[in-house]
């Protein structure tokens, strides 16, 4: 018996929007590549562990495309290998929710090769396998314990599909819900196939002797991910054989970070961006593939603003997009210079009536404090140093009744 385990295909994902069409195309291409390779293998079952679609940016033609590709997988497997594979799919958080489930789009009364799990029917059984398909839940652990675990009893090879993180197997982000390997072993599965975690993880044996497998996403989900995308083929027997199948990406997607130990002028960053782009372009030429790069500038500016970094991006058909992200740049300190011209503060605020005297007194107090204690780099007081002046300011406000309040 042969399985294909795939997840997080995110068909329709068009993010970042500036390169939405390139992303959709590359993501669809990866999916078709997976279908080609699964056909070649001649599998009995395909397990898709969630996030088949990216609901928010999905396009109708891609629903038709996905439907047709799944049908092609079944038809061609039958033609070449003489057997009809079954495709089992659970819902991930990007497929939508119960009331807006994109998986409904590919259901068809005649498509009996397709089994899509829902909240009411979480088990699939035939003469060879017993599968529990757990859709995405915010609280993975709770859903597993309450819903999935009690349904794991059945005959044949026991399989759990879920869309969530596994502790000590996936690198679980902080504050995210997850399940432990011991909890999984408690329901005594032969296999646990998971989606949601986008990086491929090598198959790992569970304490009960079963296996847990995370194939990761089939294409780059965003600039922060690393390449090496694909899925697993499993030859099931007493000693299962796992084969990783890598998918050739259509575009090269890269992120690089430019940082500096000390403050640098805009020209320095412009030069760095230029050489990053040149290096990337060289890589594109070597691979013969087009691509896009995001360069994150994270150092400090010694003068000027991020907009003063003048970019000099070469024109090349292989270079589809260059994004320079300056969100994390630290701007030069703006020193507040004391007012040179002598303005009478009370006069200036005379519209405030008697309160102008309070303003003048506060101004003197704060100006003296800045003169004495201001930080040499920012020209400001420390938050703790500000507190007494803020309190004094509030007190003075509260002691006055202003025109609006009087009426
Ligand atoms: Mn995902």
Image (spheres, helix red, strand yellow):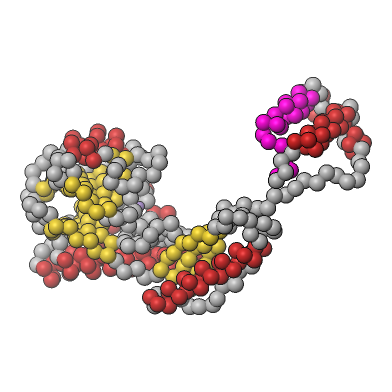
Residue 182 left/right relative to 96 = left
Q: State the residue at coordinates (48%, 72%).
A: 279
Write down the quadrant of residue 81 in the picture: bottom left
Q: Give the range drawn in magenta.
A: 378-398
Q: State the residue at coordinates (19%, 67%).
A: 39
Image quarter where the C terminus lies is top right
Q: Report the front residue among 183 and 195.
A: 183
Q: Main structural element of the magenta stretch: helix, strand or loop?
A: helix
Residue 275 left/right relative to 391 = left
Q: Can residue 321 be seen in this view?
A: yes
Q: Position of residue 106 (x, y in %)?
A: 28, 57
Q: Is residue 61 visible?
A: no
The answer to whether 373 is drawn above or below residue 323 in the figure is above
Residue 258 left/right relative to 305 = left
Q: Where is residue 399 in the image (x, y as percent from the top left)?
A: 79, 21
Residue 386: say if magenta.
yes
User: How many numbered marks have been drawn onto this rendered protein structure?
Assistant: 0
Q: Report the front residue among 284 and 150.
A: 284
Q: Report the front residue among 305 and 198.
A: 305
The answer to whether 257 is drawn above or below residue 344 in the figure is below
Q: State the residue at coordinates (42%, 54%).
A: 56
Residue 382: say if magenta.
yes
Q: Position of residue 270 (x, y in %)?
A: 60, 66
Q: Which residue lies furthest to the top in this view?
A: 399
Image quarter where the N terminus lies is bottom left
Q: State the residue at coordinates (75%, 29%).
A: 389
The answer to whether 191 is drawn above or below residue 389 in the figure is below
Q: Where is residue 166 in the image (x, y as percent from the top left)?
A: 29, 43
């Amino acid at each position: 018996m042969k399985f294909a385990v795939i997840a997080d295909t995110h068909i329709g994902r068009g993010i970042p929007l500036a390169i939405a069409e390139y992303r959709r195309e590359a993501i669809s291409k990866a999916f078709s590549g997976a279908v080609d390779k699964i056909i070649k293998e001649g599998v009995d079952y395909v397990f898709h562990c969630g996030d088949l679609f990216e609901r928010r940016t999905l396009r109708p033609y891609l629903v038709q495309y996905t439907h047709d590709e799944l049908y092609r997988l079944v038809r061609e497997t039958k033609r070449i290998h003489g057997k009809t594979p079954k495709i089992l799919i659970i819902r991930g958080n990007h497929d939508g929710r119960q009331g807006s489930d994109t998986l409904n789009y590919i259901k068809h009364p005649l498509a009996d090769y397709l089994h899509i799990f829902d909240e009411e029917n979480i088990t699939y059984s035939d003469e060879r396998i017993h599968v529990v398909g757990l859709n995405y839940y915010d609280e993975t652990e709770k859903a597993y314990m309450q819903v999935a675990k009690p349904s794991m009893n059945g005959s044949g090879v026991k399989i759990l599909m879920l869309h969530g993180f596994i502790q000590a197997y996936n690198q679980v982000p902080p504050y995210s819900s997850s399940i432990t390997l011991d909890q999984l072993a408690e329901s005594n599965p032969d296999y646990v196939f998971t989606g949601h975690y986008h990086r491929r993880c090598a198959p790992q044996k569970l304490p009960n002797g079963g296996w847990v497998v995370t194939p990761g996403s089939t294409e780059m989900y965003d600039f922060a991910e690393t390449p090496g995308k694909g899925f697993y083929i499993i030859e099931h027997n007493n000693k299962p054989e796992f084969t990783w199948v890598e998918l050739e990406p259509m575009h090269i997607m890269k992120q690089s970070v430019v940082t500096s130990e000390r403050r640098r002028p805009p020209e320095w960053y412009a030069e760095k961006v230029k050489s990053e782009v040149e290096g990337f372009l060289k890589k594109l030429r070597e691979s013969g593939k087009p691509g896009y790069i995001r360069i994150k500038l994270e150092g400090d500016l010694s003068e000027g603003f991020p907009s003063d970094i003048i970019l000099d991006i070469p024109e090349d058909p292989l270079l589809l997009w260059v994004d320079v992200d300056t969100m994390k740049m630290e701007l030069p300190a703006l020193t507040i210079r004391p007012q040179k011209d002598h303005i009478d503060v009370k006069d200036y605020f005379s519209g405030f009536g008697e309160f102008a005297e309070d303003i003048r007194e506060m101004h003197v107090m704060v100006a003296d404090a800045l003169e004495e204690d201001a930080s040499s780099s920012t020209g400001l007081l420390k938050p703790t140093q500000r507190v007494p002046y803020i309190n004094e300011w509030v007190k003075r406000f509260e002691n006055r009744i202003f025109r609006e309040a009087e009426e």
